[in-house]
Image (cartoon, rainbow, N blue to C red):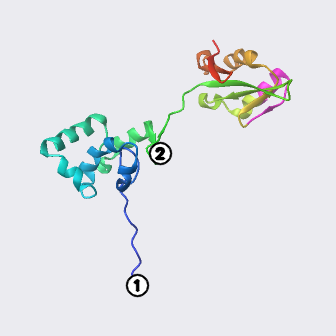
């Protein structure tokens, strides 16, 4: 009988997040070169020829100073990855800022919906917030991202800061004409 094929072990670049074989096609190949020389010299022998012994030491120092190390380094690299997540293709996932965004959406010419986003980042349960907002303003409110019927965008700031002390007024923003404007 034929042997079962073994899975291929793929080494991913710690700089751009692509497999090491595809770093040259990524947008950050110049930044990947030091990591490739140190961790995957067999994949790019031309890079190894270009770098002499002094440059290899310099590259290792650069990696140490930027906090990027080989995959075997362990917990320090894992902590770094939690701060800034790199997606495949070298894209960086930004950490969400703790802010509440209030947006007024007009529908059917005269009807308005006030949308509140970001309360969950302050530990507020959206179902409770939806009920309280619905009772306070005598309107319907949905829970997904809190939608409140009517134009209550300026009254809602005062209500949020009074009801939930964890939400500072400096963290509340309006979206007006596509621009983010502080509530204070």
- The residue to which callout 1 is attached is 2
In the image, what residue occupies the spot 43% across and 44% down? 90
Decide which of tag 1 and tag 2 comes sooner along the chain: 1
Tell me, yes or no, whether the highlighted magenta stretch contains residue 79: no
- The residue to which callout 2 is attached is 87
- Out of 21 and 17, give the one closest to the viewer: 21
In the image, what residue occupies the spot 24% across and 49% down? 37
- Out of 127 and 144, give the one closest to the viewer: 144
Q: Quadrant of the C terminus?
A: top right
- Out of 64 and 78, give the one closest to the viewer: 64
- Counting from the top left corner in percent of width and height, residue 21 is at 35, 56
Indicate left or right for 134 with 72 as reference.
right
| Tag 1 and tag 2, C-beta contact below 8 Å | no
Secondary structure beneath label 1: loop
Farthest left residue in view: 53
Please give the range of residues in magenta.
Answer: 131-143
Q: Is residue 69 above or below residue 108?
A: below
- Counting from the top left corner in percent of width and height, residue 43 is at 28, 57
- Counting from the top left corner in percent of width and height, residue 147 is at 76, 30
- Counting from the top left corner in percent of width and height, residue 50 is at 19, 48
Q: Quadrant of residue 140?
A: top right
Q: Is residue 161 above or below residue 115?
A: above
């Amino acid at each position: 009988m034929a042997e079962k094929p073994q899975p291929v072990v793929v080494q991913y670049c710690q700089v751009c997040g692509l497999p090491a074989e595809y770093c040259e096609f990524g947008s950050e190949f110049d930044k990947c070169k030091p990591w490739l020389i140190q961790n995957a010299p067999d994949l790019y022998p031309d890079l190894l020829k270009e770098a002499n012994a002094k440059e290899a030491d310099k590259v290792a120092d650069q990696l140490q100073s930027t906090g990027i190390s080989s995959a075997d380094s362990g917990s320090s690299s894992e902590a770094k990855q939690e701060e800034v997540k790199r997606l495949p293709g070298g894209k960086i996932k930004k950490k969400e800022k703790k802010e509440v965004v209030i947006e007024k959406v007009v529908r059917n010419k005269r009807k308005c919906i006030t949308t509140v986003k970001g309360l969950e980042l302050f530990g507020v349960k959206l179902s409770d917030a939806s009920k309280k907002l619905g009772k306070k303003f005598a309107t319907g409110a949905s829970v997904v991202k809190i939608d409140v019927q009517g134009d209550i965008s300026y009254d809602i700031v005062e209500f949020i800061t009074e009801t939930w002390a964890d939400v500072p007024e400096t963290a509340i923003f309006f979206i007006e004409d596509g621009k983010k404007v502080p509530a204070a």
